[in-house]
Image (cartoon, rainbow, N blue to C red):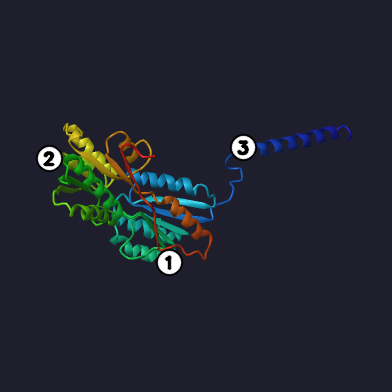
Amino acid sequence: MDAIRPQILQGLMRSRFLATAALLACLWLPGCRESGPQPRYLVIFSQCNNSEPYRAAQNARLRELWARYPDVKLVVMDAQQDNSRQIGQIETAIRQQPDLLIVAPNERAPLALPLGEAMAAHIPVICLERDVALPNYTTWISADNRKIGEMAGEFIVQKLKEKYGTPRGNVVELCGLKGVEAEIDRQEGAHDVWKRYPGIKVVANVVADWLQSRAKDRMTEILSAVPQIDIVYGHNDPMAVGAYLAAKEKGREHEMLFVGIDGLAGPSGGIEKVRDGILAATFVYPLCVDQAVEVGNQILRDPGFKPPKNLTVASRMVSAPVQP
């Protein structure tokens, strides 16, 4: 019996060693480690499209900010500039009962009903930069597009004065989606300024769906039809850049100035295009995402919190030389 005991002890020690080794190995395997706090809150973001640089920047910033909160799970949906798709995605989101629904509407009117359904289901709704036809949201975070349009209009007036000594000249206007509030306000704001100067003529006004490639195609057509262009006013930076590229292909880029809106930072953003001399100016439309996460967090964590119905974020002009 005494001769057997060392073997038993040796076996026990070996078993303990193997168990300890297995435990240590398990701790190094993703499936065995503690995963940390599980998400407590579900936030769904319905993005109108992912194809515009502005939208891609919104998505990236939203993911970056929510990633700071391990108890929040973020789901991003891409409506691909399709109203029906966005309506369907919102209806799907309602069935998932998220704790917060953030929406960048593709158009105002079609989303009024589904967002009303979300509110009726007691789902808080934050609208980013575009509202909907009915106030079916908890809060709407935006900049003042009409004011931005006025700023752009005044800048164009000044540039035409510098060129001709008086505010006159031919303007090409590149529009986003018709019927979208941002589109209406950016156009009407500028036109409110220009109507005071009969010498300023809008010689072409075309829809390019906010996209650089479509703006380039539309501008190519305009260049063939209009011999004299002084200013191109794109309702966002990608459309203004698309117009520049079309003019450059025709060897006419130095005949006119290009003005855009969005003012994104980074290598492909409007501020860099001003720095490169492609755009004469851009007008910053903030992403509104920082404010959405700040308000959204308060909504999630404080049942008694009542955010403002409308929250306006300031804008600014960036022109050459680039302002700090």
Looking at the image, which is closer to me, 252 or 117?
Answer: 252
Q: Of tags 2 and 1, which is closer to the observer?
A: 2
Picture coordinates of residue 160, whole percent (x, y): 19, 43
Query: Element under label 3?
Result: helix
Viewer can see residue 189: yes
Residue at the image point whose x is 61% and y is 43% from the top: 33
Q: Which residue is mark 3?
A: 28
Picture coordinates of residue 314, whole percent (x, y): 38, 52
Asked if residue 312 lies left or right of residue 177, the reply is right
Kindly check if marks 2 and 3 are in contact, taking CB atoms under 8 A apart as contact. Answer: no
Residue kind at label 1, given as amino acid type: Ala
The circle drawn on residue 228 is 2
Q: Is residue 268 above or below residue 135?
A: above
Q: Which residue is mark 1?
A: 121
Q: Quadrant of the C terminus?
A: top left
Query: Element under label 1?
Result: loop
